[in-house]
Amino acid sequence: MAFDSAIIILIGYLLGAIPFGLLIGKLTRGIDVREYGSGNIGFANVFRTCGAKAGLATFVLDIVKGTLAAWLGGKIIGGDHMAVGQVMGALAAVLGHNWPVYLKFKGGKGVDTSVGGLIAMSPWIGFASLAIGLVVILITRYVSVGSMTGSFSSIPILIPFVVTGNQPAEYLIYCVIVTILIVYRHRDNIANLRAGTEHKLGQKGEKR
């Protein structure tokens, strides 16, 4: 199992580290999105900098890499330990997205990738968390607020199912860990929200 775990973590990390936002920015606009707006390679900054289609493509691909990493992790270990493999793969993908080796360990915030992992583990809980986050974004126009809210929402949704034995405890542990990571990665956004300087969805990403 130790060898399988190492393989899962390596594959998950390398998948998660693929900087789709950066690649899409270069393909669609010929720019480095890190030089615009927030400097982030995630969906929100690509949306502001390169437009809705580029932002949506980044959103989908970042979700897919988390889903694929979790799915592969579950397949590699399988059996009674499938949930452990899924969590390892998904967490590795989130870490890869946040600290990608390809970009000198300066990456995104892991929101879409973490949702992708949860969708692979428990699709309806993953989509429920995603829907909550999107609704909050539409209401507030703050991607950061929706991202943190959507991530946190997975915890109270999961708790009763874990307590009744309908979902593995590993999934809840995953949600707690990624929520902590997401809030940590949004610490600058939290400061901006308090100062009233946080960018809203739809604002253009200016050259840094």
Image (spheres, rainbow, N blue to C red):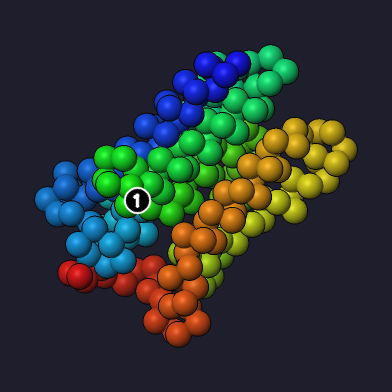
Q: How many marks?
A: 1
Quarter of the figure that contains the N terminus: top right
Is 162 situated left or right of 148 in this image? Answer: right
Is 161 situated left or right of 200 in this image? Answer: right
Q: Is residue 96 above or below residue 192?
A: above
Answer yes or no: is residue 9 visible.
yes
Q: Along the line of sight, which residue is nearer the eye, 47 or 104? A: 104
Query: Farthest left residue?
Result: 30
Q: Along the line of sight, which residue is nearer the eye, 18 or 140? A: 18
Crowding around mark 1 (Cα neighbors within 10 Å: few <14, some 14 to 19, many 20+) is many
Q: Quadrant of residue 165?
A: top right
SS of the residue under disc 1: loop
Residue at the image position 75 percent from the left and 53 percent from the top: 156
Q: Amino acid at mark 1?
A: Gly
Task: Residue 114: give x, y in percent of width and height.
Answer: 52, 44
Task: Residue 3: give x, y in percent of width and height.
Answer: 52, 16
Residue at the image position 42 percent from the left and 26 percent from the top: 11
Q: Is residue 188 above or below residue 68?
A: below
Residue at the image position 21 percent from the left and 50 percent from the top: 25
Q: Quadrant of residue 158?
A: top right
Residue at the image position 57 percent from the left and 19 percent from the top: 2
Answer yes or no: is residue 47 visible.
no
Task: Residue 110: give x, y in percent of width and height.
Answer: 46, 49
Q: In this figure, which residue is indicated by the disc labeled 1?
A: 107
Quarter of the figure that contains the C terminus: bottom left
Query: Farthest right residue?
Result: 164
Query: Farthest front residue?
Result: 2
Task: Residue 141: give x, y in percent of width and height.
Answer: 46, 70
